[in-house]
Image: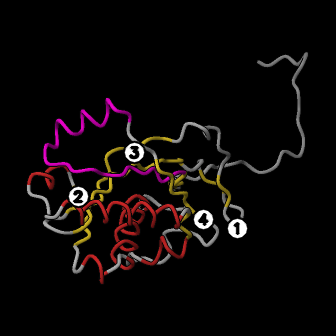
Amino acid sequence: MASYDAIGAVSMTLAGLIRDRYPRAEFGTAEVDLYQAASFHHPMKNGFSIYLYRVAVNGTVRNMSCRTTPDGRRFRPSLPLDLYYLITPWAEDTERQLRMLGWVMRFLEDQGTLSASHLNHYVAETDIFTPNESIDIVCDPLTLNDYLTLWDRLRTLPASASYALRMVLVDSTLSVDEGPPVQTRTFGIGEVVS
């Protein structure tokens, strides 16, 4: 289970995978950057931007049990998050931009799942995710209303693909204290207490 660093690690993993694997012979030297909303006012000339536009608590898993470590300590339940990204190819040539869009969509579909080794590879800490963790990559198109709203705010936005990375579990560091096991129980029924 991941610490609060998980959101940053997932974002860096997406950027790192695209940076390492895009076809240089076809697209030349391309930038791959994490974007904030202000970054769209002066976008890059050639490359891929990765914009985290929404973070939501996963609605399908709400009653998680307490997390137990191998040594038996118990912690509050993990927070299951879904991260929503907008991945945009940038190029001065329209055909090249559309080829880049097709490549990145096919690449992410082929990835399907990010394992812990992927997730820990692109950050300085190598233990943010435990070896048994993984995160699903799902193409999650924006509704037309959401896309038009986004396009209205980010006027220079070219055709983009939106993806959800599901079930990023963010662990709590608050322990759940328990008393010792109950040995006997005494009921004071009928006793007079003064």
Question: What is the CA distance from the residue labelled 3 to the residue labelled 1?
Answer: 30 Å
Element at badge 4?
A: loop
Query: Are dots 3 and 2 in contact, CB under 8 Å?
Result: no
6 in relation to 62, above or below: below
What residue lies at 34% left-to-right and 68% top-to-bottom?
A: 15
Q: Out of 185 and 103, give the one closest to the viewer.
A: 103
Q: Which mark lies nearer to you, 3 or 2?
A: 2
User: Which amino acid type is shown beneath numbered disc 2?
Assistant: Tyr
What residue lies at 13% left-to-right and 66% top-to-bottom?
A: 45
- Tell me: 76 left or right of 48: right
Q: Name the residue under label 1.
A: 70
Element at badge 1?
A: loop
Q: Name the residue under label 4.
A: 133
User: Which amino acid type is shown beneath numbered disc 4?
Assistant: Glu
Q: Name the residue under label 2.
A: 35
69 in relation to 77, above or below: below
Magenta highlight on residue 163: yes
Query: Are dots 4 and 3 in contact, CB under 8 Å?
Result: no
- Tell me: 85 left or right of 39: right
Element at badge 3?
A: strand
Q: Mark 3 points at which residue?
A: 55
Query: Are dots 1 and 2 in contact, CB under 8 Å?
Result: no
Query: Are dots 1 and 4 in contact, CB under 8 Å?
Result: no
User: Which amino acid type is shown beneath numbered disc 3?
Assistant: Val
Question: What segment is highlighted magenta in the picture?
Answer: 143-166
Residue furthest bottom in the image = 25
